[in-house]
Each structure stands twice: as structure tokens, then as C-alpha cells.
């Protein structure tokens, strides 16, 4: 879709370069297709095209894939229709819960054995699901658990959507009962963040198709508000511009982590291709095109990127491009196994935030739910957790 989809993962120093074995594509699924494409797919199989809408109601409205529950369809055709458009894409390998059941991480096995994770977080006023867009990741950020294993493969649109449908189903069925029960915990998925495994913009076509399925009105899609969606990227500039032109009011999160090229080259290796100035310009263009305030992600790493001068430099780089277009989300680093880095000291974090706020930049320290189940940002590494 974009030239960026084809960037080969940069080998790490000392690591042997090899091409991942070609994997069989996941089976085609209703959620990969628009309604017109669903009808066409059924027609090609010699099945009645008008069944596409009925199947779509089952999947997107009722969250049902069991033929036995599809009583409006002729019993003789149900199995065939389900096989044609609702194949099983994700099988749960295990689930881990935290926050008294209000945070649930699921490890999923895909049809070819690849593993990915998703995390559902239930709050009083919203439910956020963090989805994976790739098995593994080719971006090689040294502080991120997923980056350490390299890229296995892209997910299909339906494999991404299925993570959200599974969360919606689990909520409906009481699978996220926990949390502080005295609060009226939200009952429906309201937010989807592409912050699980993978670089979604490097899997552009499938990620955008997934976004469309999430926001399309039922029964074509799930009918979520695009304003509740966040696309997170290391800064693939051409894909950011393409995404800005899609006309979707989705929030963009840019994983910056350093305001200067010298350090960002190390923390986010893609910076050697698109440096800080270019990714910030692209983030600002995204704001101009969508009027959605951009989030800057900044993992605070002790004595690495948390100095007061870097907070000031970040503030300058942001304000010189305008006001009101951006906010900063610092997050204390989640140390990954074997990493030489750790989180900033609380006082240093506080000072970093205060300097940004003093410069007029809205700044919110990101929630770190699910740390103890390795469900928090950057800790997803399915291959080692199964
Ligand atoms: N590829 C996308 C999504 C990655 S995960 C991106 O890079 O934006 C979502 C966020 O978690 C990113 O901002 C990522 O930099 C951050 N992250 C990764 N590892 C982390 C860690 N160990 N501690 C804190 N944040 C981390």
C-alpha cells in the first residue's frame, strides 16, 4: 500500500540475517471485506449473496460465530456459510488478569502458530483494548520487548478486528467482571489503541481496513467512534501522510522518546531514515488534516532521555510548530528482561512533566495498567510468554 510496508527489518549488530519463512496467508474472513466484497465472495462460492448481510449481523451486531445460533439461516447452509466467511482466526492460548479482573491480557495463537497478544482494560467510563497489528515487529527499538524478536508476519485486517470482537464478547459475557464494583464500569468497548505488538503503519492496508471495520456502521462493521481509536507509530512519515488523507478522525500517537537525533537514532532506529524534525512535521501535518490532537509518547528512561534539558528541547520543538496541536504522554519505562535500562526516578519524572507543562504543553503521565502480567506497554512478547 505504501512503500513503507516493504522496509526490511534492520538486522541488529551481531545478529544473523535470515528471511522469515513465507507463511500461508490467514483464511479470508468477513471482517477483511466490505459488504459488497462479502456478497461477491459468496456469489463466487455459489452461495446466496444476500446471506452476507445476515452473517454480518451475526458477527458484528450479535458477536456470534456459532452456526447453531444462526436460526434465521437455513440449517443446511449454515456450516458452509460460516466456513466460507467466518473461519476461526484466533485461538486463546492463555489469559492473565490484573487489577482485580479489570485488566485482561490474552495470548492468541493464529492459524499458522504465530502468537500475538491483546489487552483489555476496563475503567468506570470506558473500555480500552490494546490490539496487535503484527506478530512481532521489525522496528527494533531496543527498549521494547516485542522489538527483540523481530517480525514474524503481518496480521490480516480480520485478525486485528477479531481481537476487538473477542473483547466485546467477553465484556458482554461478564468476562471482565472485576474492577471497583461500586463504580458503574463501562460495558462496551469504547477505545481501541494500536499499541500492542507491531508497527501498524508498516502493515498499512490491513491496519486501515481494520480501522474501517471498527468504525463502519453495523452490520458492515462494529460501529465504534473513530474518535475512540488511536494509531501509534514510530514515525513512518510517508504512511503518516497517507493515513492523514484517509479522512478518519483517528488519534495519532507518535512514539518519539527523544527530541534529538543523536539519542533517537539509538532508541528508535527508524529515526536514521526519518529524523525528529521530519516526524514532527508529519505529526503536525496530521493535526492540520484531521484536527485531532496528536499524542507524543515518551518512555522515561533513567539517565537516558529524562534530563531537564531534553524536556525543554522537546517543548521547544513542539511549540515552534504551533500551540494546541499536541499533548505529551510520558510513561515510566517498563524494563524488559535483560535490558540495561530502567524507569526514571519519580522526582525526575515529575520535573520532566512540570517543565513541559510550564511551556504550555498538556502532559499526562500514561497509565501503566497490567504491569504484573506483562500486559503493559512494550512488554508484549508472546513467543516468550507461552
Ligand atoms: N509500533 C507502535 C506501537 C508500539 S507499542 C509504536 O511504536 O508506536 C506502544 C507504545 O509503547 C509505543 O509508544 C512504544 O514506544 C511504547 N513502549 C515500548 N516498549 C516500552 C517499554 N518497555 N516501556 C514503556 N513504553 C514502551
Image (spheres, rainbow, N blue to C red):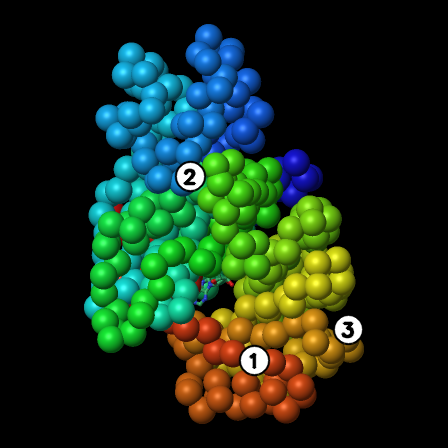
Instruction: Give the camera-side residue of 186 and 262.
Output: 186
Q: CA distance from mark 2 to mark 3?
A: 41 Å
Whole-percent x, y for residue 80 in the image: 34, 15
The residue tagged 1 is 363
Which of the two discs, 1 and 2, labels the residue nearer the N terminus? 2
Q: Can you identify the residue that label 2 sits on?
A: 60
User: Closer to the N terminus: mark 2 or mark 3?
Assistant: 2
Contact check, label 1 and label 2, Cβ < 8 Å: no
Disc 3 crowd rating (10 Å Cα; few below 14, some 14-19, many 20+) is some
Quarter-of-image position of residue 357? bottom right
Q: Quadrant of residue 102?
A: bottom left
Q: Is the residue under label 3 in contact with that under label 2 (CB below 8 Å)? A: no
The alpha-carbon separation of the residues under discs 1 and 3 comes to 17 Å
C-alpha gap between disc 1 and disc 2: 36 Å
Query: In front here: 69 or 104?
Result: 69
Label 1 crowd bin: few (<14), some (14–19), many (20+), radius 10 Å: some
Q: State the SS at label 2.
A: helix
Residue 343 location, x and y as percent? 41, 77
Looking at the image, is 135 positioned above or below residue 322? above
Q: Which residue, given by chain and number where applicable, does mark 3 sit on?
A: 321
**Relative to 170, is 376 above or below?**
below
Q: Residue 355 location, x and y as percent?
A: 60, 89
The quadrant of the image that shows the N terminus is: top right
Amino acid at each position: 500500500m505504501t512503500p513503507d510496508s516493504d522496509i526490511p527489518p534492520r538486522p541488529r549488530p551481531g545478529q544473523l540475517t535470515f528471511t522469515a519463512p513465507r507463511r500461508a496467508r490467514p483464511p479470508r474472513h468477513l471482517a477483511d471485506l466490505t459488504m459488497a466484497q462479502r456478497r461477491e465472495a459468496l456469489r463466487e462460492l455459489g452461495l446466496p449473496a444476500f446471506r452476507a448481510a445476515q452473517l454480518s449481523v451475526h458477527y458484528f451486531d450479535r458477536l456470534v460465530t456459532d452456526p447453531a445460533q444462526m436460526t434465521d439461516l437455513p440449517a443446511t447452509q449454515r456450516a458452509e456459510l460460516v466456513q466460507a466467511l467466518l473461519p476461526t482466526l484466533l485461538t486463546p492460548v492463555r489469559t492473565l488478569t490484573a487489577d482485580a479482573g479489570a485488566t485482561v491480557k490474552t495470548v492468541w495463537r493464529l492459524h499458522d502458530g504465530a502468537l500475538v497478544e491483546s489487552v483489555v482494560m476496563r475503567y468506570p467510563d470506558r473500555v480500552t483494548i490494546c490490539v496487535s497489528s503484527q506478530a512481532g515487529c521489525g522496528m527494533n527499538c531496543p527498549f521494547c520487548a516485542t522489538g527483540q524478536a523481530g517480525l514474524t508476519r503481518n496480521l490480516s485486517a480480520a485478525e486485528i478486528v477479531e481481537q476487538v470482537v473477542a473483547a466485546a464478547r467477553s465484556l458482554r459475557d461478564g468476562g471482565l467482571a472485576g474492577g471497583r464494583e461500586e463504580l458503574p464500569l463501562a460495558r462496551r468497548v469504547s477505545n481501541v489503541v494500536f499499541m500492542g505488538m507491531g508497527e501498524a503503519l508498516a502493515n498499512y492496508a490491513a491496519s486501515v481496513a481494520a480501522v474501517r471495520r471498527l468504525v463502519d456502521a453495523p452490520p458492515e462493521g462494529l460501529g465504534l467512534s473513530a474518535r475512540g481509536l488511536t494509531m501509534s507509530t514510530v514515525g513512518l512519515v510517508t504512511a503518516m501522510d497517507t493515513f492523514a488523507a484517509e479522512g478518519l478522525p483517528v488519534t495519532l500517537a507518535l512514539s518519539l522518546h527523544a527530541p534529538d537525533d543523536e539519542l533517537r537514532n539509538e532508541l528508535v532506529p527508524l529515526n536514521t531514515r526519518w529524523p525528529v524534525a521530519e516526524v514532527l512535521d508529519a505529526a503536525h501535518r496530521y493535526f492540520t488534516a484531521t484536527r485531532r490532537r496528536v499524542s507524543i509518547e515518551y518512555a522515561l528512561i533513567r539517565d537516558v532521555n529524562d534530563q531537564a534539558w531534553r524536556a525543554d528541547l522537546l517543548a521547544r520543538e513542539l511549540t515552534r510548530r504551533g500551540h494546541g496541536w499536541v499533548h505529551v504522554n510520558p510513561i515510566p519505562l517498563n524494563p524488559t528482561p535483560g535490558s540495561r535500562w530502567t524507569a526514571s526516578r519519580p522526582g525526575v519524572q515529575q520535573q520532566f512533566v512540570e517543565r513541559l507543562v510550564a511551556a504550555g504543553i498538556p502532559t499526562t503521565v500514561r497509565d501503566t495498567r497490567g504491569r504484573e502480567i506483562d500486559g503493559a506497554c512494550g512488554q508484549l512478547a508472546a513467543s516468550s510468554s507461552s
